[in-house]
Image (cartoon, coloured by chain):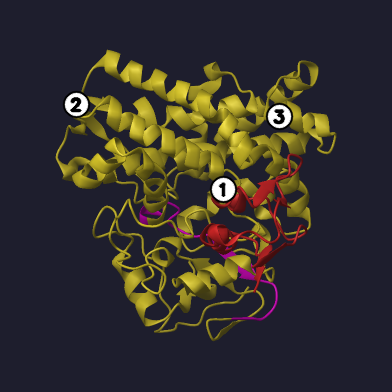
Chain colours: A yellow, B red
Amino acid sequence: MTKAMPRPDAVTFPTARQTPFDPPAELGRWRDEAPLRRLAYPDGHLGWLATGYAAVRAVLGDPRFSNRVEIAHLPLKEMATGQDILRFPPGMFLRMDPPEHTRYRRLLTGQFTVRRMRLLEPRIEAIVADRLAEMAAAGPPVDLVPAYALPIPSLVICELLGVPYREHDRFQRDSATLLGLEPSEEEKLAAFQDLFGYLGDLVRHKRDEPGDDLISGLIATGELGHEELTGVALLLLVAGHETTANMIALGAYTLLRHPDQLAAVRDEPEVAEPAVEELLRYLTIVQFGPTRTATEDVEIAGRVIRAGESVTLALAAANRDPERFTRPDELDVRRPVAAHLAFGHGVHQCLGQQLARIELRVAIPALLRRFPGLRLAVPYDEVPMRTDMNIYGVHRLPVTW
Amino acid sequence: MKISADHDVCIGAGMCALNAPQVFDQSEDDGTVVLLDPTPPEELEQQVRRAVQMCPSGALKIHE
């Protein structure tokens, strides 16, 4: 491990935000000076921070950077325990490199094609309609997070995997614990074991009684052992919940704060698709990474990253790069669609991105149309933001109509 | 414009099929790219360029 010597030019990763929708201001200032700079990691490692769009894209697309957790350094002390847990089970292919990664990924990509996800669209519309009906029946005010944003993606993933809805609350609780910064190592381990145990039982059940779901489909390939299947199911569940849920809630909140753009999303069907891409770019909810580690010396943006050095990629800063986007700090739901880095880039780019797109394209306009008078039920400064979590968003969003 | 698709590099993200469905499809087996038309007509150029730009693996190339 490279022990960091004190260096006046090395920064530490900032987490405090000055405004609710913009990344920490230092990231943008640093990016405008240089796309890559030295980063001091809490474990003493001296690595790099990439804030420029081209540099981030270059690192994520370069096979000389590894995602293996054994050689990784993490930019924030609190992230460490969650990552240890991700290392444990076989099948957690997120933290592998090609060719091991490729084997797992290829078994799944056929399940997540544009066409397959479009086939799910009627189910997603039905799930969304049910949630809206329940909200209407309960009457205002409502916290949009538990009432709408959390249930929709978890119901969709449960449907995809063949998990019964009655096991729902258990998953949300456990996955929130796994991904949060506050829970202790013991709490995370307990949540992980609970989830892993249940999914193991589910896999066994599906072997005996296959259904028309992803777990049964994976079992049918004969390619994965029991622990691998369970690990893959856990990864998909954890990845599919918190991220999309936060985009729904934070996306709704963002539009509530930009009423003219909210009206466009609500009233103009052709705006839905570019609006989803723009919200993804503008909000970039993966806020503390990802991080990759060089396995050999690599030149990026005119600097040499040595073998063994880690690079943390500030996706949110890259998605606001003026060299890539005009008026980058402005939300513009009509902005012509262009590639952004909210789903990452390279071989680990979000597997579920097409599913996420459809969920957002259905859920956000439907909410605005069902409740045209939707507004916050509290003052702006009473909406608590998830500045402490790996995935940014709102902890609560009390709304009325 | 001539398009090539490297099947080994492709990770099946589907951005090509999403942006230029007349030119790109995804395999039902593993989601990897199926190049429907290696010499797409001029009216599809903008969509094809966007598809190539958005490909996360660099599997797609334009040969001018």
For marks 1 and 3, give the one nearer the viewer. Answer: 1
In the rendered structure, find residue A401 and report the number of the disc placed on it: 2
In the rendered view, would you say B10 is above or below A256?
below
Choose between A255 and A96: the one closer to the eye.
A255
Question: Label 3 belongs to which residue?
Answer: A215
Label 2 marks a residue whose chain is: A
Q: Residues under labels 1 and 3: Cα distance?
A: 25 Å
Please tell me in which quadrant of the rendered image residue A207 appears: top right
Is residue A298 on the magenta stretch?
yes
Tell me the kind of residue under disc 3: Ile
Residue type indicated by callout 2? Trp
Q: Secondary structure at mark 2?
A: loop
Say whether residue A241 is left or right of residue A9.
Answer: right
- Asked if one can make out residue B11 in the rendered structure from this viewpoint, the answer is yes
Residue A133 is one of the magenta-drawn residues: no
The part of the chain drawn in magenta is: A282-299
Secondary structure of residue under mark 3 = helix
Task: Choose mark 3 or mark 2, whichever is in front.
Answer: 2
Q: Residue drawn at (33%, 60%), measured in percent from left and top?
A: A23
Q: Which residue is mark 1?
A: B18
Per the model, the C-alpha gap separating discs 3 and 2 is 40 Å
Contact between labelled residues 3 and 1, with CB atoms less than 8 Å apart: no
Read off the chain for label 3. A
Q: Secondary structure at mark 1?
A: helix
Disc 2 packing (10 Å; few <14; some 14–19; many ≥20):
some
- Give the quarter of the figure containing the C terminus of chain A: top left
Where does the N terminus of chain A fall, quadrant-wise? bottom right
